[in-house]
Image (cartoon, rainbow, N blue to C red):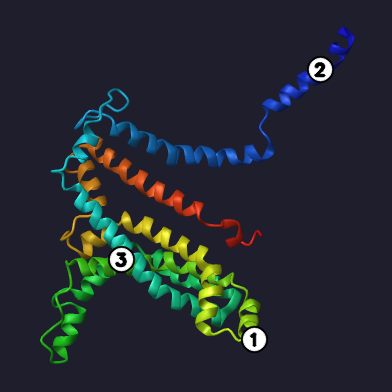
Amino acid sequence: MADIALAHAPETAVELRRARVLSAGARCALPVAILLGIGFLAPLVAILGYAFATPRSFDVFRSFTLENFATLFDPSNTVWLSFLWSCGFALATVAILAVVAYPIAYGLNVVFGRAAPLISVLFVFPLFVSENVRLYGWVLFYIKNGVLDGTLKWLGFSGGPEVLYTPGITLFGMVYTYLPFMLFPMTLGLALVPRDLIDAARDLGAGRLFIWREIELPLAIPGILIGMLLTFVLAIGATAEAKILGGQSIIVISHDIEIAFTYSQNWPLGSALAVIVTVFISGLTLFALSKLDLDRMLGRR
């Protein structure tokens, strides 16, 4: 038995050394894991640490208190009004874009077929220009004596409507900004609907409304829901639209977080608010993704 043990000892040592060495896939993924750890996980840990720090201090990881969360949950705190405004704007943006983007996505699929997702990338080109630059372009268009107002006066009218610095123009800016984020997943979802299935249903006498309700919509719903979810997550954290177009007539939750980190210099309070918003968005995202069949959407089965 001792001889057998000695005979297997070198092999066991080699196996142990091999076990300690990362696989080829793990070694390739290591730089990405380090980058995500430094750029994504570390800031989240820092925010979480500050959320439990002493208010108006920088004693991160050296103190523990729930006072910041108690302040936020105080009935007299108006921060929840900002949160409701953000949720309302995000929901309205999703609803409007769902109605606006669906006909565009459907038309792209009918005209271009399988090339529709590639063609829809053209709608992403405005993202190559800074969002602030594009929003200030709308300010120049709608401002008094601006493009719209000046053109109407030149044509003999009294002038343009006063639309700047209102909740309506804030919503318009969000719809304009987040259209590509709704359109591309929706186009991809509709592109996965088999045309043969639609033709077969039509040959069997199914009407257009029946085909849409029973075939197209159920098969395209993963792409539609992902577009809605992506748009909602981005819109609930929107700041530039409310500041530039809305003139801060409405204070959104992201602006409250910015104020806590800048003018108020109360990083623990801002971190606590950021943690609450992050938990809310993460919970909503995980719930939505649990209801989606991503494998079918990506064409894996």
Tell me what residue is drawn at x 20 percent, y 66 percent: 167
Of 212 and 138, the residue lying toward us: 212
Which residue in the structure is indicated by mark 1?
A: 203
Q: CA distance from mark 2 to mark 3?
A: 68 Å
Residue 20 lies in quadrant: top right
Q: Is residue 24 visible?
A: yes
Left or right of 124 in this view: 250: left
Q: Between tags 1 and 2, which lies in front? A: 1
Left or right of 300 in this view: 251: left
Tag 2 near tag 3, CB within 8 Å? no
Mark 2 Cα shell of 10 Å, populated few (<14), some (14-19), many (≥20): few
Q: Secondary structure at mark 3?
A: helix
**Most extreme residue toward the bottom, as rendered?**
156
Amino acid identity at mark 1: Asp
Left or right of 275 in this view: 148: left
**Most extreme residue toward the left, as rendered?**
158
Q: Secondary structure at mark 1?
A: helix
Tell me what residue is drawn at x 33 percent, y 37 percent: 47
Q: Is residue 239 visible?
A: no
Q: CA distance from mark 1 to mark 2?
A: 71 Å
Q: Between tags 3 and 1, which lies in front? A: 1
Of 173 and 125, the residue lying toward us: 173
Q: Between tags 2 and 3, which lies in front? A: 3
Amino acid identity at mark 2: Pro
* Mark identifier at residue 92: 3
Of 264 and 273, the residue lying toward us: 273
* Mark identifier at residue 10: 2
Residue 268 lies in quadrant: top left
